Amino acid sequence: MDVNRNKRRSRDLELPNPPEDDVSCLAEIEEYDETTCDPELCRCGTCGSMLVQPIDWSLIGRSHWRVVLRCPNCEWCGTGVFGQEAVDRFDRELDRGTRKLQSTLTRVSRACMEAEVEAFAAALETDLIVPFDF
């Protein structure tokens, strides 16, 4: 597998002034070619994990975002400038992942509580718990 093929291209922009006042920043964004960046921001360019997380993101101009990404699997970190559409897809994927985690947490919590209740009921039935335990 070609390792260089999966690496994201990142580019830092220095912003001395707010984006709306900085014409040079806007000129750099116009040069940005979205087709050269991997639009699947949730996939790590190093290990291929789908668990990449945003560490920080800030608006650059009116339609681009500077995003700092981190992969918890291989500890890869990178920064890139991405268009609004790519960031919106990433945001939807993060929301989907959050819902999945919440659902899993609910199932696991319920299973643990059921196991505790069953163990408590079994202890009561076999007289392993007596009044002075309380």
Image (cartoon, helix red, strand yellow):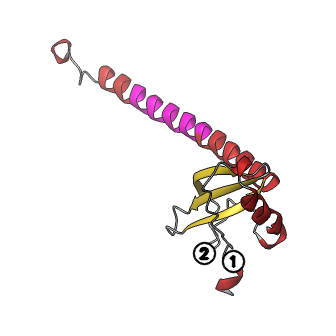
Rendered-image quadrant of the C terminus: top left
Q: Quadrant of residue 106?
A: top right
Is residue 89 inside the magenta stretch? no
Q: Residue 67 at what x, y percent from top left?
A: 64, 57
Q: Quadrant of residue 54?
A: bottom right
What residue is rendered at 18% in x and 18% in y? 133
Q: Amino acid at mark 1?
A: Asn
Q: Is residue 12 left or right of residue 39?
A: left
Considering only vertical position in the picture, is 126 above or below 14? Answer: above
Disc 2 target residue: 46
Q: Amino acid at mark 2?
A: Thr
Question: What's the mark number on residue 44?
Answer: none
Question: Which quadrant of the view contains residue 10?
Answer: bottom right
Q: Main secondary structure of the magenta part?
A: helix
| Region of the chain picked out in magenta, as a range | 102-118
Residue 51 visible (yes or no): no
Pointer 1 residue: 6
Distance from disc 2 to disc 1, alpha carbons, whole Å, reads 6 Å
Q: Residue furthest top?
A: 131
Q: Which quadrant of the figure contains the N terminus? A: bottom right
- For the point 60% across and 56% down, which residue is it? 16
Q: Are marks 2 and 1 in contact (CB under 8 Å)?
A: yes
Q: Within 10 angstroms of label 1, few (less than 14), some, or many (20 or more) residues? A: some
Residue appearing at x 51%, y 61% in the figure: 72
- The image position of residue 65, as x and y in percent, is 70, 54
Q: What is the secondary structure assignment of the residue under circle 2?
A: loop
